[in-house]
C-alpha cells in the first residue's frame, strides 16, 4: 500500500480502501482501528463481502475498542499529570474536564452510567472515557462504560449498513448514506433528550 493511497483514504471518506489492504478478519480489524475510507460502514461492508458474520464483526469491533483503551488511557493520564505539573496544561485539562461534563450533561445526570454510555454512543468512546474520568470512574469501569456506548453505536450502524447495503446494492452510495446517518443520529439523540427533559 503506498503512502498516497493511505493518506487519501484517511482524508477522504469516499475514497476506496487502498488496494493492498490486508485480507480477511485482520483487514476488518485494521479498518476498525484506522478509520479509512468510511470507517465503520466500510468495515462492515468489507467484513460482509469477505464472509465475516455479524457475531465476528461485533467481536472484532470490541477488540478494536479494547486496543483503543490501552492506547488512549496513557495519553489521558499523561495529560492529567502534565496538568498537575504545568499550569498551562492544567488549564487544558480543566477545559477537557469541563467539556466532558457538559457533553455528559446533554444526556442527563452527568455522573450516571447511562448518561456516560450515551456520551460514548453520541460522540465517541474517547469522549465517553474522558467524561467517565471526570465523573470519577477509574480505568476498568470508565472504559466499560465507554465501550458499552460505542458497542451499541456500532451494532446500530452495522445493522443499518447491512440493511442499506442490501437495499441499495452499491457500496459507495451505502457508505455515503451511512456517513450522513453517523452525523445526524447523535444530534437527533441529543435533541430528543432535550425535548424529553422539558
Image: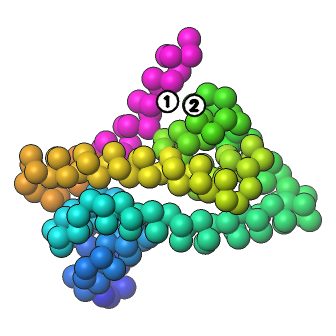
Residue 89, position as x, y percentages in the image: 82, 60
Check the image and name the residue furthest to the front. 55
Locate residue 100 relative to residue 179 in the image: left or right. right
Query: What's the residue at 15%, 59% (across, down)?
Result: 171
As displayed, is residue 183 above or below residue 129?
Answer: above
Q: Is residue 119 visible?
A: no
As displayed, is residue 133 above or below residue 16?
Answer: above
Query: What's the residue at 26%, 73% (across, down)?
Result: 17
Q: Which mark is residue 107?
A: 2
Question: Within the image, what quadrant is residue 20 found in?
Answer: bottom left
Check whether the beta carbons of the residues at disc 2 and disc 1 lie within 8 A of each other. Answer: yes
As displayed, is residue 10 above or below residue 14?
Answer: below
- How many dots with numbers? 2
Query: What's the residue at 33%, 45% (across, down)?
Result: 156
Question: Would you call the spot at circle 1 few (<14 residues within 10 Å), some (14-19), or many (20 or more)?
Answer: some
Q: Is residue 157 visible?
A: yes
Residue 73, position as x, y percentages in the image: 67, 66
Magenta-span inclusion, residue 113: no
Query: What's the residue at 41%, 30% (across, down)?
Result: 188
Magenta-span inclusion, residue 190: yes
Main secondary structure type of the part rendered in magenta: helix
Q: Which mark is residue 190?
A: 1
Closer to the camera, 157 or 20? 157
Closer to the camera, 98 or 59? 59
Q: Quadrant of the C terminus?
A: top right
Residue 40, position as x, y percentages in the image: 34, 59
Q: Which stretch appears magenta?
A: 180-198
Q: Which mark is residue 22?
A: none
Q: CA distance from mark 2 to mark 1?
A: 7 Å
Amino acid at each position: 500500500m503506498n503512502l498516497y493511497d493511505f493518506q487519501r483514504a484517511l482524508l477522504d471518506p469516499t475514497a476506496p480502501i487502498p488496494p493492498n489492504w490486508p485480507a480477511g478478519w485482520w483487514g476488518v480489524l485494521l479498518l476498525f482501528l484506522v478509520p479509512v475510507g468510511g470507517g465503520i460502514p466500510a468495515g462492515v461492508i468489507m467484513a460482509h463481502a469477505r464472509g465475516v458474520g455479524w457475531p465476528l464483526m461485533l467481536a472484532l469491533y470490541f477488540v478494536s475498542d479494547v486496543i483503543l483503551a490501552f492506547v488512549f488511557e496513557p495519553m489521558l493520564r499523561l495529560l492529567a499529570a502534565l496538568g498537575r505539573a504545568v499550569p498551562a496544561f492544567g488549564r487544558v485539562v480543566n477545559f477537557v474536564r469541563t467539556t466532558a461534563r457538559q457533553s455528559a450533561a446533554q444526556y442527563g445526570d452527568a455522573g450516571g452510567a447511562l448518561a456516560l454510555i450515551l456520551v460514548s454512543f453520541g460522540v465517541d468512546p474517547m469522549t465517553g472515557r474522558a467524561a467517565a474520568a471526570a465523573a470519577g470512574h477509574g480505568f476498568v469501569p470508565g472504559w466499560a462504560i465507554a465501550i458499552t456506548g460505542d458497542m451499541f453505536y456500532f451494532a446500530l450502524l452495522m445493522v443499518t449498513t447491512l440493511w442499506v447495503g442490501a437495499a441499495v446494492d452499491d457500496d459507495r452510495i451505502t457508505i455515503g448514506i451511512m456517513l450522513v446517518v453517523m452525523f445526524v443520529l447523535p444530534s437527533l439523540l441529543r435533541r430528543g433528550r432535550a425535548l424529553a427533559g422539558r
